[in-house]
Image (cartoon, helix red, strand yellow):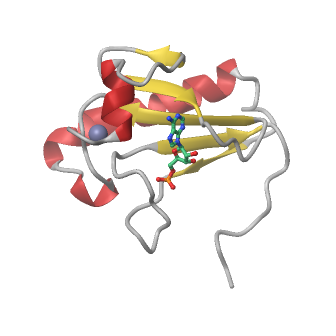
Amino acid sequence: MKDCIFCKIVAGEIPTQFVYEDDQVVAFNDIQPAAPVHIILIPRIHIPSFDDIKPEHKGLMGHLAWVAGELARQKNISEKGYRLVMNCGPDGGQEVFHLHFHLLGGKPLASGYGRQ
Ligand code: AMP
Ligand code: ZN
């Protein structure tokens, strides 16, 4: 997808070191980390947001979730715990419209999820 930052990362047009990659998924460190571990996990294909998941993406989404758990174990944050976040749409705080998980951990994270 033209003009999508994360598609450019997948295509190698924005040089980015992957912490994980396979035929369906890539993962890399967030450029503005909010925690000691802050990894972005994305599908290689362009799905704009959680709201765009179709039945044919079920396997891919399951795989993405499994990779997130694997990376948490590799980064040694699974015992103490971590947070997986997927922002959806403007009110959800999504800024990059290529579906992604944030994997956050390595410190106690504030409880709650945006209560005001
Ligand atoms: P969201 O607000 O959920 O759309 O999150 C987008 C995330 O992508 C933010 O945490 C950004 O810091 C991160 N990000 C944007 N551009 C890059 C990049 N080139 N490399 C790594 N992370 C990025
Ligand atoms: Zn994209």
Q: Using residue 87 as the reference point, say whether residue 3 is left or right of it.
A: left
In the rendered view of the protein, which quadrant contains the N terminus? top left
Q: Quadrant of the C terminus?
A: bottom right
Numbered circles on residues, count: 0
- Above or below residue 44? Residue 34 is below
Residue extending furthest toward the bottom: 116
Q: Is residue 44 left or right of 64 when viewed as pictured?
A: left
| Above or below: residue 57 compared with residue 51 | above
How far across and how far down the image is residue 4, in percent?
A: 30, 41
Whole-percent x, y for residue 77 in the image? 75, 31
73 is higher (above) or lower (below) than 38: above
Residue drawn 34% across and 24% down?
A: 10
Q: In this image, 109 relative to 49: left or right?
A: right
* Most foreground residue, 38 or 2: 2
Task: Pinpoint residue 96: horizontal percent, then vertical percent.
Answer: 41, 51
Whether residue 99 appears in this view of the structure is yes
Identify the residue at image location x=49%, y=26%.
Answer: 27
Residue at x 36%, y 18% (from the top left corner) = 12
- Say whether residue 62 is visible: no
| In this rendering, position of residue 73 left or right of residue 66 | right
Q: Quadrant of residue 35?
A: top right
Q: Nearer the viewer, residue 46 or 80?
A: 46
Q: Position of residue 43 (x, y in %)?
A: 33, 32
